[in-house]
Image (cartoon, grey):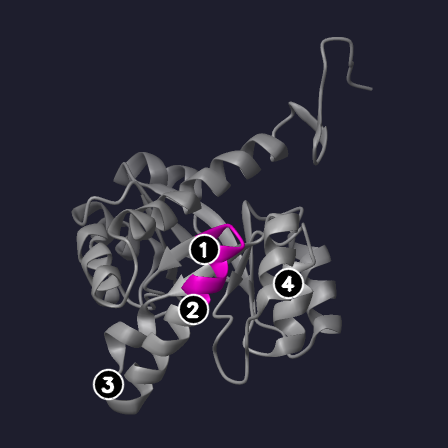
Amino acid sequence: MYEAVYAHPDGESTASRAAVAAGRYDYDGVVVRALDASPDYDRLRDDLDVDLVDAVEIDASNPERASGAVGNYRPQRELLILRGGTNALNRFAVEQPRVDVLSRPMDGDGNFNHVLAKAARDNGVRVEFDFGPVLRSDGGTRVQAISALRKLRELVEYYDAPYVVSATPSSHLHLRSPRELAGLGEVIGFDPEQVLDGLREWGRLAARNRERMSESFIAPGVKRGRYEEDD
């Protein structure tokens, strides 16, 4: 299972510190969400015995800016996440097969409906269940976050849209174990196994994308055959 963390400078902790903490919580790896962080991933994987996925989370003001960023980062990163939070960005994300994950779809003015759920399913865009606000807020904000998660779960489940789960930690101190997240999910209406599978999905995505980026693929979706030769 993997957790998707915000690493310095986008978060408070370095990628290595988050990975060490994740290992203590029995995660197999971390997805490092960062625009500018550029650690030596190969060295860290060897030193820490925890997988680190070179990811980017695009935080754009509108679909036009998001489109440019997706084009720039898609060839470079192992996993591409687009932050939602407005109806326009949510729609753009789920209609783009180049996007791996739509994060925070219910943030701000964002909404999610059956049309977006079907588009996410058809284009293979994972929808993120963000448990962070439930863990790190209280009062009315926490109640709203729970309500939003329940609505999102119903849509994702009904239309069989793919999904991931995260506590969206921006510090190693925000990490929670898979068992804790499964317990929290059960309290707010998720099946515990559903939560754990959402944590596993990060790793499956990373493995798929790494294979696509390897020399065995000529282009996304086109695998090099036995008769293909390098120029």
Q: Which residues are magenta?
A: 152-163
Position of 113 compared to 9: left or right? right
Q: CA distance from mark 2 to mark 4?
A: 24 Å
First in residue order: circle 4 vs circle 1 = 4
Q: Provide the residue designation for mark 3.
A: 138
Q: Is residue 211 above or below residue 145?
A: above
Q: Provide the residue designation for mark 2.
A: 9
Whether residue 196 can be seen here: yes
Percent x, y of residue 37 = 47, 59
Query: Residue 120: within the magenta?
Result: no
First in residue order: circle 3 vs circle 4 = 4
Q: Provide the residue designation for mark 4.
A: 93
Position of 176 compared to 157: left or right? left
Q: Quadrant of residue 23?
A: top left
Residue at (60, 48) in percent of width and height: 124
The local secondary structure at tag 1 comes to helix
